[in-house]
Image (cartoon, rainbow, N blue to C red):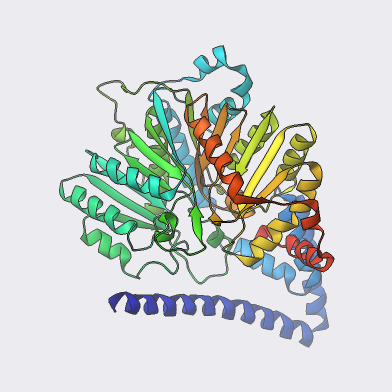
Amino acid sequence: MKEKKWFRAVFRRRIFVIAILLIQIAFILSLIASTSMNSHYVGWALNVVSVLVCIYIVNKKEKSAYKLTWIFLIMLFPIFGGILYIIFYFQSNPRKLKRYFAESERQCRPLFLLPGDSLPFLMENYEDCLPQARYLQEYAGFPIYVHTQAEYFPSGEDFFKQVLVELEKAERYIFLEFFILSEGQMLDPILDIMERKAREGLDVRLMYDDLGCFMSLPPDFKQQMEQRGIRCTIFNLFKPIFSSLQNNRDHRKIVSIDGKVAFTGGMNLADEYINIFPKYGHWKDAAIMIEGEAAWSLTLIFLQMWDLGKKVMESYGDFYPWREDPCPVKSDGYVQPYADSPIDAENVGEHVYIQIINNAKEYVYINTPYLVIDDNLLSALTLAAKSGVDVRIITPHRWDKWFVRMVSRSYYRQLVMAGVKVYEYTSGFNHSKTFVSDDKVATVGTTNLDYRSLYLHFECGVWIYKNSAVSKVKEDFLKTIPISTQITLEDCSRSPIRNFGRDVLRIFAPLM
């Protein structure tokens, strides 16, 4: 009964927020429309504003798909389209946020290298992966590590079991960062361990995205956590304001334990991820655990986001776990965690994916829940297939968002015609985000193949090379193929009317 009461309260609150947003939009549109109708000159002025905004958009450093979508909308509604764009993008000032994030990155860069610089060892032995490793370390600022073991989990159930084991081993701190939390049989045992560890004197922190938990947590959840001794922060509180900053969500999933062990991947902390609650049939997901030097990298990535949410700056070096003794973990290839941020102009997640595709000689296998991509990724995938690389993609057959499903399927024709093998996972929802290529390289993380993940959200992942976990990622993909249906060219051409509808929706893909 108590759960139903808070759910009703959350539902009412969220409906109120949505109503406020709709009222704002309606008020702006009615004000512009009535003003332009009462004054011929105002109507002309608003049209001129729309033209000037279109010129600005064309010359803006941004993805062409975003430009096309906005220009299409402005030309469709020339009187108020330009004003809407201005209100959406310019009512908030992100410059202070950018300066803060830049200062945090400046402080963190040398700390990522506390375990040492392993790039020279890679340069001596493996030239084929150097562009990828150099890009992530020397430009993006995320070093490559040895002295690290990686374990791949092909399901939420396996991930959950191991997280509970590792949390019990914590001695100094536990840091959790997730997009979605939902009280139940997955989250509750984790919180119980965190509460107990907090009572033992450990630094225990929990961070979650407000929009991601829009309907899944009670309004006083943060206060509940603080009462249990768990330090808690909500990232980017969702406010009923028509602003582009509401797009920048924390989609990362990180568990860091003492800076020695860390997890990331597609899993959130909700019961559907471990198939207790069959929301969309069987939930297929993936995660990776890294133990050793590379876990420090994900710890720093968490601390940066925590301080961004709290608007503070900590002494990050105090959390380094191997100040007295060197890391004892044996090396298993190379491991390179990375993060992506919408605050800067660097699309790290997209570049990792594109480099894996472009460097593939024999095959590249991809798991993704969404397939809404721009010209760069589309060109990379089709060119690889045309060049004789075995390119395969598994998407879900059962989807969580109808419109995303329709747009994803609009890409099938072009991909299949180029020789890309596209499959749909028929047992349920495929939420995995994995790439694996040539038995050498793989990445497991949080970044979907859609515009929101690639360009608007905070994301993270782990790139692995010559590591034993690479074969596990490949094995998991190949085991999923028999329980998936391959999409044929005939499947893509059955309904011209439906295809046209998908193509129309594709114009709005950047907004999905």
**311, above or below 73, in the image:** above
Left or right: 436, with 229 as reference point: right
Residue 68 lies left or right of residue 353; in this view the side is: right
* Horizontal and vertical percent position of residue 487: 72, 52
> In this orientation, does residue 307 appear?
no
Residue drawn where x is 73% and y is 32% of the image: 389
Who is closer to the viewer here, 387 or 193? 387
How many numbered discs sit on the rendered protein?
0
Q: Is residue 173 above or below residue 457?
A: above
- Expressed as whole percent of the image width and height from the top left, the position of residue 236 reads 45, 59
Left or right of residue 468, residue 322 in this image: left
Q: Position of residue 176 (x, y in %)?
A: 35, 48
Q: Is residue 238 visible?
A: yes
Residue at (52, 31) in percent of width and height: 470
- Above or below residue 227? Residue 264 is above
* The C terminus - image quarter: bottom right
For the N terminus, the quadrant is bottom left
Q: What residue lies at 81% left-to-right and 55% top-to-bottom? A: 490
Name the residue rendered at 52%, 63% in the picture: 280
Q: Residue furthest bottom?
A: 38
